[in-house]
Amino acid sequence: MRWLREKWARARGSEDFAWACLFTNVVGVPGLGTLMARRWEGVPQLMLAIIGGVLLTWWLVAFMIAELRTMELPPPGGPALGLVVWGLAFFTAGWLWALASSVAVFRATRRGGPPSRRATS
């Protein structure tokens, strides 16, 4: 297990690892790549993405249920559009913040410094 930790610590300083963090944040789940780089900002980024995803999913399910009940588009008495707007806002905020954090990790790696603000153990 120790060799795995050492290998992970060495990889954290590489440019390939910074690219992996960027790709994970932008294409995968916002905040997850930041957490991979051991930066605390990943937690609120991940929470924003999850909250946004839940709101979007909730609205989509409510819309589909209302549509299937009435068979009209748009369904009368369907879900409020505010849910989808707030969901998009939360997810976009988390995504943009994760993008900025990924760029910071990438720049720190290019400068030769550690990608996180705290020392590794």
Image (cartoon, rainbow, N blue to C red):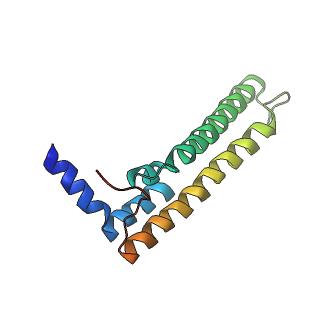
| Left or right, 72 with reference to 112 | right
Residue at horizontal 60 percent and vertical 51 percent from the top? 94
Q: Report the label total.
A: 0
| Left or right, 3 with reference to 88 | left
Task: Tell me if residue 20 comes above or below residue 50 in the rendering.
Answer: below
Q: Where is the N terminus found, in terms of image quarters?
A: top left
Q: Where is residue 65 shown, x and y percent of the image?
A: 69, 26
Q: Residue furthest top?
A: 69
Q: Where is residue 109 shown, x and y percent of the image?
A: 38, 70
Q: Nearer the viewer, residue 34 or 79?
A: 34
Task: Tell me if residue 110 comes above or below residue 71 in the rendering.
Answer: below
Residue at horizontal 80 percent and vertical 39 percent from the top? 81
Q: Nearer the viewer, residue 36 or 2?
A: 2
| Left or right, 20 with reference to 67 | left
Q: In the rendered image, is residue 29 in sight?
A: no
| Left or right, 68 with reference to 77 | left
Q: Nearer the viewer, residue 104 or 73?
A: 104
Corner quadrant of residue 14? bottom left
Q: Where is residue 11 shown, x and y percent of the image?
A: 26, 61
Q: Where is residue 45 shown, x and y percent of the image?
A: 56, 48
Residue at horizontal 38 percent and vertical 51 percent from the top? 36
Q: In the rendered image, is residue 17 in sight?
A: yes
Task: Tell me if residue 50 comes above or below residue 71 in the rendering.
Answer: below
Q: Residue furthest right?
A: 76
